[in-house]
Image (cartoon, rainbow, N blue to C red):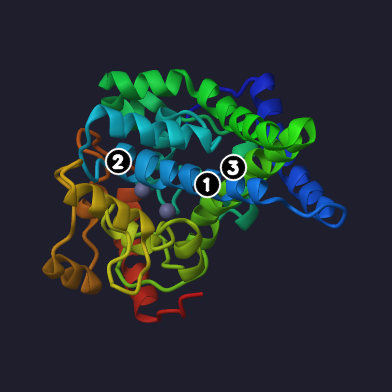
């Protein structure tokens, strides 16, 4: 974890970003009793939710952090901007935090392990002075001009994600329509996107089944799988971080993988990373630490505490995988 202290202004902003959408959602639900939600509000919420969720799952996570496929600038720019609109921080910070999670998953140095507490894994770590170490964990990404540009202009895209629903609501219903558009398409959408992404960190390291032997507590969770566009198949993801598909069976619904597959079919993206059935079969029986730590080309994960603990955690992981839990 970086020693850089978080500034007071940053701390205030983080508190606001966590609590205001929660209060706005409570207000939006309360307001339903006095005024029914309009089709414009619902459309803004759904379209905003889906675009931001895909920005995180396809853009920030599978494309940027794990290089699960290669894409031309306009597709990369589109997904990274959608990811920025989800209000989860600049792309580079997100990638560095997530690589640090893979490097130390459920060990000392994991930014958000539920072994500390479920609340800490869900949101406490954000409120708790965490600051990402971009050069150390996402160094190769600093050479990518587009990624650096979208990261530096993060605030523009994040604020646009609030302004656009206000303007659309305003166009349909004047000032009142604008305010409700802002609440449903901006703040409620942000609240849902946040908690579903955070659930991958908290729920998917606590509840669910384990198909593959890994050195952490990652789990496959059907509910998070559905809500988070396929990211809930998190044990699969820790076993094969580079894979563009997180669902490894036809019944493991993974909308992000379907979109990636469609873009590939149309020739818009290439070099999509997928795992051969033989490798899947091998990993059901034994851990492969090398594969688990292959998170992003060019990033070599240090083998400190994690390596020293590896022998013990692998043995533990094998016994946990044997005693599989139900998926929810
Ligand atoms: Zn994880
Ligand atoms: Zn990952």
**Label 3 C-beta lies within 8 Å of the nearest ligand 1 atom:** no
Q: Is residue 198 left or right of residue 119?
A: left
Q: Which residue is mark 3?
A: 125
Give the residue drawn at x 63%, y 42%: 185
Crowding around mark 2 (Cα neighbors within 10 Å: few <14, some 14 to 19, many 20+) is many
Seen from the viewer's position, the closer of residues 38 and 157 is 38
Residues at badges 2 and 1 in contact (C-beta under 8 Å)? no
Please rate how many residues cluster around mark 1, counting C-alpha atoms within 10 Å: few if below 14, some from 14 to 19, many from 20: few
- Residue 65 seen in this snapshot: yes
The answer to whether 199 is drawn above or below residue 248 in the figure is above
Q: Depth check: give the residue in front, 120 or 193.
A: 193
Residue 220 screen position, x and y as percent: 41, 67
The residue wearing badge 2 is 63
Query: What's the CA distance linking mark 1 and mark 3?
Result: 29 Å
Image side of residue 306 versus residue 19, left or right:
left
- Element class at badge 2: helix
Q: Is 207 situated left or right of 258 in this image?
A: right
Could you tell which of marks 3 and 2 lies nearer the N-terminus? 2
Q: What mark, if any, has residue 47 been given in the picture?
A: 1
Residue 257 point in image, percent of width and height:
30, 56
């Amino acid at each position: 974890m970086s020693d850089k202290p978080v500034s007071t202004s940053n701390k205030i902003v983080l508190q606001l970003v966590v609590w205001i959408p929660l209060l706005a959602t409570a207000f939006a639900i309360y307001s339903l009793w006095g005024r029914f939600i309009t089709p414009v509000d619902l459309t803004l919420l759904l379209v905003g939710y889906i675009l931001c969720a895909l920005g995180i799952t396809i853009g920030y996570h599978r494309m940027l952090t794990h290089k699960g496929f290669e894409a031309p600038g306009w597709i990369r720019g589109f997904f990274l901007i959608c990811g920025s609109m989800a209000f989860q921080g600049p792309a580079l910070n997100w990638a560095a935090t997530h690589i640090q999670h893979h490097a130390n998953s459920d060990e000392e140095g994991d930014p958000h392990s539920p072994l500390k507490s479920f609340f800490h894994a869900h949101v406490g770590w954000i409120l708790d002075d965490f600051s990402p170490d971009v050069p150390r964990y996402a160094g190769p990404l600093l050479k990518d001009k587009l990624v650096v540009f979208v990261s530096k202009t993060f605030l523009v895209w994040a604020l646009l994600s609030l302004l656009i629903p206000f303007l659309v609501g305003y166009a349909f219903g004047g000032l009142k329509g604008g305010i409700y558009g802002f609440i449903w398409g901006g703040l409620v959408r942000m609240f849902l996107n946040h908690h579903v992404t955070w659930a991958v960190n908290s729920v998917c390291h606590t509840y669910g089944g384990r198909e593959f032997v890994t050195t952490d507590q990652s789990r496959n969770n059907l509910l998070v799988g559905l809500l988070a566009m396929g990211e809930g198949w998190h044990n699969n993801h820790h076993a094969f971080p580079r894979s563009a598909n997180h669902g490894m069976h036809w019944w493991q619904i993974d909308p992000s993988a379907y979109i990636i597959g469609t873009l590939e079919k149309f020739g818009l993206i290439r070099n999509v990373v997928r795992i051969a059935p033989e490798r899947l079969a091998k990993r059901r029986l034994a851990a492969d630490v090398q594969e688990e730590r292959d998170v992003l080309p060019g990033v070599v994960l240090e083998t400190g505490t994690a390596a020293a603990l590896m022998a013990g955690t692998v043995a533990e992981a094998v016994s946990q995988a044997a005693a599989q839990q139900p998926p929810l």
